[in-house]
Image: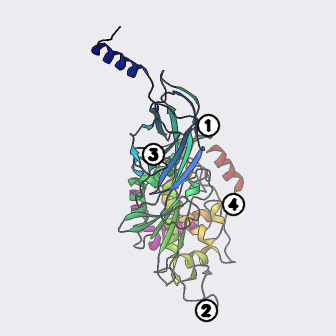
Amino acid sequence: MRLKLTTLVSLLALMLSTSCKKDEYVNLKATIAGESSLIGTVEGSPFIYNLSLSKELSEDLPIKLVIDTTETVKYINKDDYNPIFEYSSDSGKTWRKGTASSVTFPKNTKDLKIRLNTLDDKKLEVHEEFKLNFTVDAGDKFSISGSIDPVECIVEDNENNISVTYGIAIYALDNNNFNLIALNREKISDNDQKSIIDNGLKQEVKDDILEVTSFGDIGIKYLEVMFDFSADLQGFVRNVSKSGEDQWYMGLELSRAYYTVDPVTKMKIRQKYNENGFFGYVLTHEFGHIMTLNQAREMDILTGPDDCSRLYIREGCAREASALDGFNTAFYDESVTLNEPSHVTAYARTNIVEDIAESFAYYNSQEDTPISSTDSSGALRKMNFVANLISLNKFRTPIREAINVKLPSSYSDIRAHFNRTKDGKRISCIDHGKIAQAVKDR
């Protein structure tokens, strides 16, 4: 029996369509794995992560990717990386673009490199982190076993850094601009601290610092920012000049401007900026140091201890008619007896430098200062010393107009009057029993 030509052609076509080509491979089953759970890179360089399959697949396998920053304080900012993932199946010789949420594991391959490019923004930053999460989009088509653990990713900032003494950051002041010049990358432990580094100081903080420190026509050159509510150190200043001029370096604890202690639970709670006046008090105290230790008018660093006929401290020899030398004569001479309380605060007892700065801050925190007499407490007499010295009392009005300055609640309840009851009745400072009772009665 003979086949017609058309029938033969049809049979050949059917045979070709139902037979397997020699190089055709069908497999939709494999085990997937990732290389590690921690990778790192330097800012400006890419992250590269390796995936592997136990067998080659005959279809492209979609891989979904998510950059997760929800559980890390040192989160990577979105402008610090290119969100488009890239991938390579030929050991990095060529790269294809994926999307911001997926790449493809190409068929007929067992190894895949995934790349995310970070950007060098020339900014001083913390070492940033994020978590890279993978999801194999197998659907009903594939049978994929194994899993890819979330990967911790760390981007080390490549900007040079200098050491920070106590806090988290140092700013250099130039024409009222706060320029970040150093940070303590290891100390960033909460979102408030991270925000300061990323976004800079809030304008309200900068305004108050600039205004208060400018009143004495000396100002500050550097600001070290601290932000640790549990820390004891609230502020400090030092003159960093080595040439006989004033270049003041100030450190301030900013957490107390935004948080306070709940009187009932004793827990930290948020408050409006400087609502309780504590930060204003600390800033005023540190400003008082600058006004009593500056080299322009108060201290002589060229006269050594052997040639100094007045008070000599680490900062130099007190000049004639300086606030500190007058304070020393009035209250630190061996012949002077002071009624209790002799100091405005316990901290004022540290040394004469802290004593005059606390007296200055305490004076500025009060609505008024009662006139003292020889029967008054040493604390009240010291406040009157500040009140009667033009080089210090001239700052009271501008400071109080510029910033909320209040006595810290943890300090003495006797407040500025010291030798009066709550109703204003005078008590002799020698009568310690009545003073104690007045404190107890508020």
> Which amino acid type is shown beneath numbered disc 2?
Asp
On residue 430, the disc is 4
Label 3: state its secondary structure.
Answer: strand
Which of the labelled discs sits on residue 264, or is there none?
1
Report the predominant secondary structure element of the magenta stretch.
helix
Disc nearest the viewer among 3 and 2: 3
Q: Which amino acid does label 4 sit on?
A: Ile
The stretch of residues the image draws in magenta is 382-406
**Mark 1–mark 2 CB contact (< 8 Å):** no
Q: Is the residue 184 above or below the residue 175 in the image?
A: above
Which residue corresponds to mark 2? 307
CA–CA distance in space, label 1 to label 2: 56 Å
Q: Where is residue 125 in the image (x, y as percent from the top left)?
A: 47, 57
Q: Mark 3 points at which residue?
A: 88
Q: Label 4's element?
A: loop
Residue at point 63%, 87% (across, down): 305
- Residue 139: in magenta span: no
Q: Position of residue 111 (x, y in %)?
A: 53, 42
In three-dimensional space, the C-alpha distance between marks 4 and 1, rounded to whole angstroms, equals 35 Å
Q: Nearer the viewer, residue 49 or 426?
A: 49
Please say if the residues under marks 4 and 1 sit with CB atoms less than 8 Å apart.
no
- Mark 3–mark 1 Cα distance, whole angstroms, equals 60 Å
Q: Quadrant of the N terminus?
A: top left
Q: What residue type is labelled 3?
A: Ser
Mark with earlier residue (4, 1): 1
Alpha carbon separation for disc pair 2 and 4: 40 Å
Spatial CA distance of label 3 from label 2 is 77 Å
Residue 176 versus residue 100 in the image, above or below:
below
State which tag comes first along the sequence, 3 or 2. 3
Q: Which of marks 1 and 2 is nearer the N terminus?
A: 1
